[in-house]
């Protein structure tokens, strides 16, 4: 069984002219785990993987596999299996012949070809030309190429792209199995929900810089999670919570309780003979945290060199908005909790506070707001165009496309509307208000 190797990125930087595609990236990927490599489009993921595999020369820094650069490996295909693109195949070759070329180049026994084709589910189409393969079948063939040398390190770029739901589930179980064998598995993906079910650790970059590194359980602070519980007898449940001195927030979907685990609340309700209709732990989703990390709203300690936005900066201004308007079930620990019930206030009813608070609307902290121009005319002014201003016209093509015909510009002399103008005058006739229209003789039908 092959041994996994540690992947280390130390100060990895790549500049294309004035553009820094990757900027001082330092990370460590351990064997025996599936590590997800996340980031928005243009964050530098593919460039980082290419530098790791020796396809792009870094401007500065190093990328090593087991302490050695990829170009220094004695048996690259037996050490690292990589699949960056699903289109790097000769369309006229069959799947088996494509693997045969790679096997001969790396001095791998050809008996391995049938093994990997069966492993990825392409044994029945081994003789078919790759040009007729679907995107999902090409992905499987790329994975077969990566596994051909039975390597201890796997680097896959968007491995589930093009796969159907059954194929995605198969890919997930295969990656988990390979990691359990002790291999190092590094995958990049945009499917956050799938990543959350597959990976053990995460590496997130934005703008070429590291914003998070660690286990998926380290993404959110424990204080960001809350227990949501509900019961047909809400009065009895609230009475028990008040007696035990447990703070809660009553919303439409039930009681939101922080700093108490669901097992504790469930046991308390069971001991009091209260039937529960809902009990779960809720917190910020991977999507919410990912968007906050890449936008700068959230700064994690593992970022290395990251700084908390200054007060007054756009990121700092967006943070209170997210806390005050976000979903309380997914709100961070520093969010303001409205209408929080405490045991001391249980006996004194507050007439100004409703018994059931409304759920806040979703956060718009990450939505860019365009400020209207100061010199924009008022609505009443915009609604009253000048009588001398030329009218805009339109033409409808046979395909249904509407083309806006710009008005004619007055130069020196009469202005004529362009041909095809759908107005009260015929095409080619001088526009109203320029020169008197000439009457033309009738054409006999």
Image: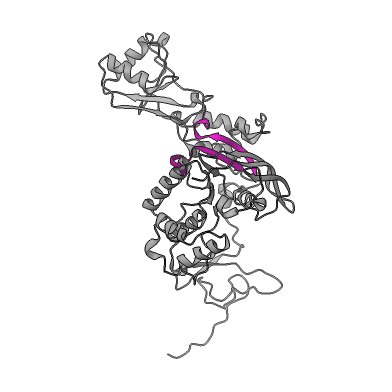
Give the x, y percent position of residue 403.
52, 67
Q: Image quarter for residue 114?
A: bottom left
Can residue 384 be spotted in the picture? no
Magenta stretch: includes residue 364 = no
Q: Does residue 174 lie above or below 281 as drawn? A: below
Colour logic: one colour
Q: Does residue 26 lie above or below 380 as drawn? A: above
Of all residues, the one furthest to the bottom in this rendering is 444
Give the x, y percent position of residue 338.
46, 22
Can residue 46 be spotted in the picture? yes
The C terminus sits in image quarter: bottom left
Q: Does residue 408 lie above or below 42 as drawn? A: below
Nearer to us in this view, 244 or 251 = 244
Residue depicted at x 45% and y 19% = 259
State the extent of the magenta-drawn residues as a range.
194-220
Nearer to us in this view, 84 or 341 = 84
């Amino acid at each position: 069984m092959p041994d996994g190797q540690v992947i280390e990125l130390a100060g990895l930087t790549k500049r294309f002219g004035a553009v820094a595609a990757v900027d001082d990236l330092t990370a460590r990927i351990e064997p025996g785990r599936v590590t997800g490599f996340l980031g928005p489009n243009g964050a530098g993921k593919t460039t980082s993987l290419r530098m790791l595999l020796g396809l792009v020369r870094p401007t500065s820094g190093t990328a090593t596999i087991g302490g050695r650069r990829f170009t220094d490996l004695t048996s690259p295909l037996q050490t690292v299996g990589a699949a960056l693109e699903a289109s790097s195949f000769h369309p006229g070759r069959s799947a088996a012949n494509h693997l045969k070329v790679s096997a001969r180049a790396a001095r791998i026994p050809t008996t391995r070809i049938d093994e990997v084709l069966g492993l990825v589910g392409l044994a029945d189409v081994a003789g078919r030309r790759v040009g007729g393969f679907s995107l999902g079948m090409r992905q499987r063939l790329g994975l077969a190429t990566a596994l051909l040398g039975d390597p201890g390190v796997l680097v896959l770029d968007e491995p589930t792209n093009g796969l159907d739901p059954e194929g995605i589930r198969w890919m997930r179980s295969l990656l988990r199995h390979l990691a359990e064998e002790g291999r190092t598995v590094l995958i990049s993906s945009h499917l956050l929900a799938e990543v959350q079910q597959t990976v053990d650790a995460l590496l997130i970059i934005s703008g070429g810089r590291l914003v998070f590194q660690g286990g998926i359980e380290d993404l959110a602070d424990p204080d960001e999670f809350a227990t949501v519980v509900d019961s047909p007898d809400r009065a009895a449940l609230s009475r028990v919570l008040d007696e035990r001195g447990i703070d809660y927030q009553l919303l439409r979907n039930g009681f939101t309780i922080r700093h108490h685990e669901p097992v504790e609340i469930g046991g308390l309700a069971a001991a009091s003979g209260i039937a529960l209709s809902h009990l779960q732990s809720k917190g910020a989703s991977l999507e919410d945290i990912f968007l906050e990390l890449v936008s700068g709203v959230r700064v994690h300690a593992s970022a290395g060199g990251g700084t908390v936005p200054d007060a007054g900066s756009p990121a700092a201004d967006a943070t209170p908005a997210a806390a005050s308007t976000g979903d309380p079930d997914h709100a961070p620990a520093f969010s303001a909790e409205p209408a929080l019930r405490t045991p001391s206030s249980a006996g004194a009813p507050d007439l100004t506070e409703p018994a059931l608070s409304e759920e806040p609307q979703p956060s718009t902290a990450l939505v860019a707001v365009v400020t209207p121009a100061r010199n924009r005319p008022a609505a009443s002014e915009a609604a009253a165009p000048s009588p001398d201003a030329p009218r805009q016209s339109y033409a409808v093509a046979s395909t249904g496309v509407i083309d806006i015909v710009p008005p004619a510009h007055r130069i020196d002399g009469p202005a004529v509307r362009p041909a095809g103008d759908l107005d009260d005058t015929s095409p080619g006739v001088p526009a109203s208000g320029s020169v008197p229209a000439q009457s033309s003789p009738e054409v006999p039908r």
